[in-house]
Image (cartoon, grey):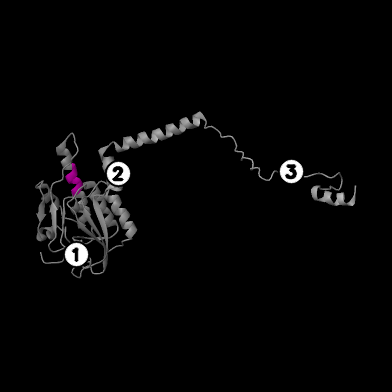
Amino acid sequence: MSHQNSQGGENNFRRPPTGPSVAPPRIPLHQPPPPPVHPPRRKPHFWTVAIFVLLVSGVCIRAYRDLSHPEAWDYWKDQYVSSSMTFTPIAKVDLDGAAHGRRALQVSGTIGPAAAKLFRDRLDQLNLTAGDMILLSSPGGNLNQAVIMGEIIRSRGLVTAVGSADASGRIKPAYCASACVLVYAGGKTRFGVLGSALGVHRFVTTRPVDDPVAEAQRISGAVLGYMTKMGVSSSVVEAMSETREIRWLSPKQALAMNLVTDPLGKP
């Protein structure tokens, strides 16, 4: 082999140290790359699919049963779809000098089935502390939820007043009737806003019961126990029992019943 052939061979061959020259494989310049190799798909096992379907069906059936009760559906709707109450924070309220600088939460609207939970969540978000105010403006609503809201107010040392606040924080008169009065009674101090009104009436159940008289007595006893616990005179329950229509208490009556503990104007 000539020297030139030896030199040209170095361009086309690799010369391993222990063997003959080996030519590299020729790769076409324009050949597309081989398609990627995917691992074979595993078909889902029949029993896996069957168990998944059964689990989903069980959850759906349970949810349907729970929401098929009117109370459960009303609670779900009130909490997640359209709440019957609105909760508006007020940075500083001015209650004729008696509550100047207090933070407040304005609570207005009908007391719905989920009102207590929504109320508690809002208080936690605002981090209201003892001495801060709950402003009420409501025609009433769910009795049980009202009791729970009153208990929450008392446990946190909040004060209550009936009214609504404008942009400057000054409180304007409003009214609080029926179950709203129980929420108002939860205040450690209960301010009487001049021009605002408190209305009471006899509570009755709206669901069918075997003995309506016994149920009415049970409700009256529960309301009496709650009002007594909150420091309100039992005479307020007597005023409630007199009529199924709203009876608006005069400032003197509300003060005599100890429902109002701090009147801002002369009754």
The image quarter containing residue 215 is top left
Q: Position of residue 128 (x, y in %)?
A: 31, 61
Task: Identify which residue is drawn at 59% across, 34% down.
Answer: 40
**Cα separation between marks 3 and 2:** 73 Å
235 relative to 81 in the view: left or right = left
- Which residue was labeled with disc 1? 171
Amino acid type for the residue under numbered disc 2: Trp
Q: CA distance from mark 2 to mark 1?
A: 33 Å
Q: Is residue 230 visible?
A: no
Q: Earlier in the sequence, mark 3 or mark 2?
A: 3
Give the label on residue 127, or none: none
Task: Give the residue type at disc 3.
Answer: Arg
Residue 70: x %, y % from top left: 25, 38
The x and y percentages for residue 87 are 26, 56
Residue 25: within the magenta?
Answer: no
In the picture, the quarter occupied by the C terminus is bottom left
The residue furthest top is: 46
* Number of the label disc, if any, that sits on residue 26: 3
- Which one is in front in this view, the residue at disc 1 or the one at disc 3? 3
Would you call the spot at circle 1 few (<14 residues within 10 Å), some (14-19), or many (20 or more)? some
The residues colored magenta run 218-223
Element under label 2? helix
Q: Say whether disc 1 or disc 3 marks the residue closer to the N-terminus.
A: 3
Q: Quadrant of residue 188?
A: bottom left
> Which residue is situated farthest in the right direction here?
1
What residue does disc 2 label?
76
Within 10 Å of disc 3 (Cα), the crowding (few <14, some 14-19, many 20+) is few
Q: Is residue 152 visible?
A: yes
Provide the secondary structure element on which disc 1 rests: strand
- The residue under the point 80% across, 48% down is 12
Q: Are marks 1 and 3 in contact (CB under 8 Å)?
A: no
Q: Nearer the viewer, residue 57 or 192?
A: 57
